[in-house]
Amino acid sequence: MLLDRRSLLAAASLTAIAAPRAAWAQSLAHGIFTHGIASGDPLPDGVILWTRFVGGDGRVAWEVAEDEGFTRVAQRGVARASVASDYCVKADVRGLQPGRSYFYRFLSGAGPSFTGKTKTAPATGGESLTVAMFSCANFPFGYFHAYGHAAVREDIDLVLHTGDYIYEIQRGSYPSAAETVPGRLIDPVAETVSLSDYYQRYATYHTDADLLELRRVKPMSVVWDDHEIANDAWMGGAQAHQEPTEGRYIDRIAAASKAYFDWMPIRRPDNSVRLYRTFDWGDLARIVMLDTRYIGRDRQIDYRTTLTPQLAQGGADAASLAAEFRRTILDDPNRSMMGAAQEQWFARTLAESKQRGQPWQIISQQLVVGDQFAPAGMTDLLPADASPGSRAWFNSGVQMSALGLPWNLDAWQGYPAARARFLAACAANANNAVILGGDTHNCWVNNLAAADGSRLAALEFAGGSVASPGFERTLTNATPGQRESIMRSGNPQLAFCDLTNRGYGVLKFTRTTCESEWLAFEDVRSPHAGAPIVTRFTSTASASGGPGAWTL
């Protein structure tokens, strides 16, 4: 369901007028809570609360209570909305009890916000944890059915978003005007570059009722991917950033990261662009949030400048050229995905979790780790009228895969040495690592082997997209299941994939098992969600030696 800005403002105003006001709140600013409320980054004793408030001097109050009627208030305080943060308000609430649900709200002189529900993490113990995972929500491509479906599930404890929460792309480009779902237009019209641009784009996304409801009732922990900044971002630039016409990249990073931290209900570990952080769910799990997109990432390799010209030369030995490319460029051990400081921090936090005896290490990051090779039959699924760009991309994928080279150089497979270090850290320092990811818009469920092949280093659930299209947009000459069977035939570590539908993942962790679901919606262009298609997988935790393989 989509609400326009006027409807949201009217609803907020009516709620404020109708609801009773606490006497102590009379001196607060008069105004409107414009884009709902949210909570996130839960700790055993606290949680982040968020809202956006416009009016007066911006002075508002917040309350956290044990009951929905707010007769048993656990904590309360005062905060202030300011133009400096786009009128977004955040409160880092502490002094709560571990492992319990709370109700929360904000108060103004005109009345309260909507009431939300959140949860703190257990300090010890913790027999189960159920997380919902999302990625890639392109607003004009379709409705956010996945968000709405998850919001009403009582079993979900925590929402994890692995990135592409917004898209920076100009209106009418991706999707085209013809592909844009009616009524789902984004502001500003141009690509987001400045701070005010990013603020407008977040405001547009937060007119979606399903997103607002998910934020209201579930605590969230999120990380960015490239589209919160610019397409194919890395630490020194981005494919979609052009200097000098779009200014300095460092200024764009500053604008994009500030807008992100202002609008997201999360803590900022320090006053920098550092995003990586960790949370414990009692003695059951450690949740590790990584930045594999910006903070320490080297530039992506491009076949068009490093290998394709050589392969195009008549009489060239393709196998020898590919081997030389791998040896001198692709396998360079100095190429980094996370940077040395984050790699070291990652290994330490896994080891600390293992020492604590937590069965599970849940790693929420942006990109697919498992191999993705394109079998020869994939190009047969392209329609006769496929665009030259699409045909070239799939033909290149098949050509490179036949040479034993990765298809997607923007994923972990394009950074082999860094990926080897990443999986080695999982194998050596974690009990049972489960890696979450996104970015590709398709769902991939992988069993990731340790370097010696004797056991698994980790499980992977790279969980598709909320609305951004996958291979079904291009590989249209396919019968049901054909896209998926072709990909499985060329990637033996792949336990399951969905290249056709949009959706989200749910993973329930207990002391002994991880029970997972992929919930797929067949049509995100329709405002009516319908019942999702549910596929289930299970893995078992081991005391040592890594997790058991996914079983369907």
Image: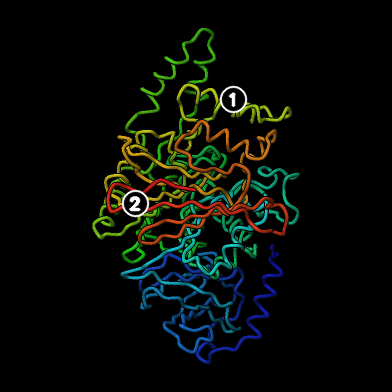
The residue sitting at the left extreme is 355
Circle 1: element type:
helix
The structure residue drawn at horizontal position 51% and vertical position 16%, both measured from the top left corner, is 311
Which sits in the foreground, 529 or 179?
A: 529
Residue 327 position within the rendered picture, expressed as x and y whole percent measured from the top left: 36, 22
Identified at 32% across, 69% down, the residue is 125
SS type, badge 2: loop
Total numbered labels placed on residues in the image: 2
Of 390 and 9, the residue lying toward us = 390
Looking at the image, which residue sits at the far bottom?
A: 23
Q: Residue 200, image x and y in percent?
A: 61, 58
Question: Residue pushed farthest top?
Answer: 315
Q: Position of residue 129 (x, y in %)?
A: 42, 64
In percent of the image, x 45 and y 86: which residue is there? 73
Q: Is residue 541 above or below residue 474?
A: below
Q: Earlier in the sequence, mark 1 or mark 2?
A: 1
Residue at the disc numbered 1? 395
The quadrant holding residue 549 is top left
| Disc number placed over residue 84 in the picture, else none | none
Residue 354 appearing in the image: yes
Q: Nearer the viewer, residue 97 or 171?
A: 97
Dots 1, 2 in contact, CB < 8 A:
no
Q: Which residue lies most toward the front here?
A: 552
Q: Which residue is mark 2?
A: 432
Three-letter amino acid code of the residue under disc 1: Asn
Q: Which part of the image, by quadrant, shows the N terminus?
A: bottom right
Residue 274 visible, this orientation: no
Could you tell me the amino acid type at mark 2? Asn
Examine the rendered structure and indicate whether residue 373 appears above or below residue 445.
above
Residue drawn where x is 47% and y is 76% of the image: 79
